[in-house]
């Protein structure tokens, strides 16, 4: 599937719009349209129901070491800045970036690719960030050396495609989109947290951050949850909410945005069983995506190599999807499942013990030295049976609602053929969304706008509306109405026709198989409800 086709369908049918479009858009931000908002809500609702609402705390699910409890939380986006110091985000949550003095563009250092090229006695590292790297680099090299395509043999390639990170001397580099050579600055760290200043004074002391993840809101409320509910270890706290990252190069539709939504769980357990719980969550989260229709061929669970792990983690796995905008064979992260040990609770209790890390200015004491940096609160857990205190370990399944929604959209997009009114096969675009995720579950049509058909169809529509998302449409040829619903991903269409008026039955059409069958008016709502729930 070509990505452009999906992007264009998303706009045409109202799944996704570029944010602030009438003002030319704002890079890294997206708006969900009438169909998109329903789809994304269904993704979040499916996650919340499966993680929290329908969780049975009395029975151990298959693969789980024991029964456990799950509760929810909704914490603030802006929190005490010290939280980000203790979580490590203040010091470590950064990408290396370079600026171009000529074009004023800023790039992520690791995303610039290039090749050494030599012609007319000069040797230059020609770069790009475009997706068709090799073609673009060749085009730029020919232009730089004033060569025509027919003289391409005068150009000597002296290396394969490689990252700019491998180049020591930036004075020989032709930056992406630049005309001059050597316009890139030395790489430097760029923190991805967006800043803001709550209160009337905009100064260092009032600096705060938009959260770059929802998880820390869970850790800092873990004690509140323990004290206000009767949960016992093992238990999980779930949260869905917006996060913000000042991504240097947002790209690939909503895949990498600056504002996005996360669905995260912190699962607290005893250190002795944490490895088993990690494996349980890793496998359960992978299954969640296949159950909702992501094909296993495009989905993979990838365990991180030991050198990829954070220093505190004894295991991390990513659920990855082969998004169509990625090169063949490459996968993009949908969700990370991390064994975080007691790192976060310990940090919020004791502070970060790294003497080399720079202190947050707000936490400087009168002597100019950093003050005690943890919360100082006792976050240990007391085991009722043994009376012993310990710091629980946390397993963190952390997923992105927008990335999941995008994966479901990519997976759903199909072009096949279906007969039109005259029985002639025509190409159709169909979004094969899982019925649980489909924005509209059923559409109801009167075949024609007369003979009492609209009245019957409206009654069916009203009966559906109370139970699930339904849509009524009486405009235009019925074939066109089917096509619109195919593009919206509506699993069932119900048509009231001439026969309805004599035998009280309607036609139900299945979006995927195109099968049609007749159902009694009295049964149709229930039959569809069963199929979509
Ligand atoms: P990446 O390596 O792609 O930047 P990450 O490893 O930094 O992702 P996490 O910090 O593990 O991501 O965040 C958890 C989840 O949040 C990701 O799996 C992804 O689904 C989502 N997410 C993270 N960053 C973004 C973003 N910029 N835009 C959309 N979703 C995001």
Image (tube, rainbow, N blue to C red):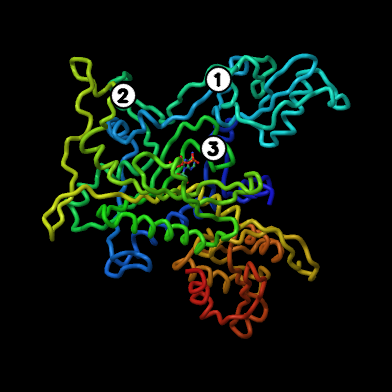
Q: Is mark 1 on a helix, strand or loop?
A: strand
- Left or right, 404 with reference to 146: left
For mark 1, what is the residue? 99
- Left or right, 270 with reference to 302: left
Residue 355 locus on image (x, y percent): 27, 25
- Left or right, 437 with reference to 375: right
Do the CB atoms of the residues marked 1 and 3 lie less than 8 Å apart? no
**In the drawing, what numbered circle is on residue 19?**
3
What is the distance, in whole Å, between disc 1 and disc 3 at their CAs? 25 Å
- Earlier sequence position, callout 1 versus callout 3: 3
Mark 1 against mark 3, which lies toward the viewer? 1
Q: Is mark 1 within 8 Å of ligand 1?
A: no
Question: Label 1: how many residues lie within 10 Å, few (<14), some (14-19) or many (20+)?
Answer: some
Q: Residue lying at the far bottom in this picture: please name it.
A: 503
What is the distance, in whole Å, between disc 2 and disc 3 at their CAs? 41 Å
Residue 156 locus on image (x, y percent): 78, 24
What is the distance, in whole Å, between disc 1 and disc 2 at their CAs? 27 Å
For mark 2, what is the residue? 356
Q: Residue lying at the far right in this picture: please name it.
A: 150
Mark 1 against mark 2, which lies toward the viewer? 2
Q: Front-most of 458 and 11?
A: 11
Residue 374 locus on image (x, y percent): 22, 33
Residue occupying image coordinates x 34% and y 25%: 197
């Amino acid at each position: 599937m070509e990505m452009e086709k999906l992007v264009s369908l998303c706009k045409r049918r109202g799944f996704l719009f570029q944010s602030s479009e009438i003002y030319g858009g704002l890079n890294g931000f997206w708006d969900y349209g009438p169909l998109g908002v329903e789809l994304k809500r269904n993704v979040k609702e499916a996650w919340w129901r499966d993680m929290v609402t329908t969780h049975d705390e009395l029975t151990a699910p298959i693969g789980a070491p024991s029964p456990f409890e799950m509760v929810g939380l909704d914490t603030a986006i802006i929190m005490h800045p010290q939280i980000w110091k203790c979580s490590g985000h203040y010091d470590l949550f950064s990408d290396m970036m370079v600026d171009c003095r000529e074009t004023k563009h800023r790039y992520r250092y690791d995303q610039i690719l290039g090749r050494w090229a030599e012609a007319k006695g000069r040797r230059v590292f020609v770069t790009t960030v475009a997706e068709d790297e090799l073609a673009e680099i060749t085009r730029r090299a020919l232009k730089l050396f004033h060569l025509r395509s027919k003289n391409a043999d005068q150009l000597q390639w002296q290396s394969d495609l490689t990252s700019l990170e491998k180049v020591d001397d930036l004075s020989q580099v032709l930056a992406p989109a630049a005309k001059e050579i050597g316009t890139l600055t030395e790489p430097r760290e760029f923190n991805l947290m967006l800043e803001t200043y709550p209160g009337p004074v905009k100064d260092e002391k009032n600096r705060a951050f938009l959260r770059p993840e929802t998880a820390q809101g869970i850790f800092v409320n873990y004690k509140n949850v323990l004290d206000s509910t009767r949960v016992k270890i093992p238990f999980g706290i779930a949260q869905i909410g917006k996060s913000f990252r000042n991504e240097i190069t947002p790209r690939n539709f909503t895949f990498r945005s600056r504002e996005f939504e996360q669905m995260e769980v912190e699962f607290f357990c005893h250190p002795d069983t944490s490895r088993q719980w990690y494996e349980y969550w890793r496998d359960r989260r992978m299954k969640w995506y296949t159950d909702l229709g992501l094909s296993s061929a495009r989905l993979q669970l990838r365990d991180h190599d030991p050198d990829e792990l954070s220093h505190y983690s004894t295991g991390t796995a990513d659920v990855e999807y082969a998004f169509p905008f990625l090169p063949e064979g490459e996968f993009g992260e949908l969700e990370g499942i991390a064994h975080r040990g007691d790192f976060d609770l310990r940090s919020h209790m004791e502070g970060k013990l790294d003497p080399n890390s720079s202190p947050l200015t707000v936490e400087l004491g009168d002597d100019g030295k950093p003050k005690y940096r943890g919360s100082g609160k006792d976050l240990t857990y007391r085991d009722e049976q043994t009376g012993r205190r310990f710091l629980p370990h946390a397993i963190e399944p952390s997923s992105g609602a927008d990335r999941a929604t995008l994966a479901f959209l990519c997976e759903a997009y199909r072009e096949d053929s279906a007969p039109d009114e005259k029985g002639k096969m025509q190409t159709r675009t169909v979004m094969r969304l899982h019925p649980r995720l489909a924005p509209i579950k059923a559409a109801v049509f009167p075949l024609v706008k007369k003979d009492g058909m609209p009245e019957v169809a409206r009654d069916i529509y009203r009966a559906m509306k109370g139970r699930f998302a339904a849509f009524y449409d009486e405009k235009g040829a019925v074939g066109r109405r089917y096509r619109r619903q195919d593009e919206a991903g509506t699993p069932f269409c119900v048509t009231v026709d001439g026969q309805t008026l004599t035998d009280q039955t309607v036609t139900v059409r299945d979006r995927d198989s195109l099968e049609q069958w007749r159902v009694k008016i009295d049964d149709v709502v229930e039959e569809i409800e069963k199929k979509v729930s």
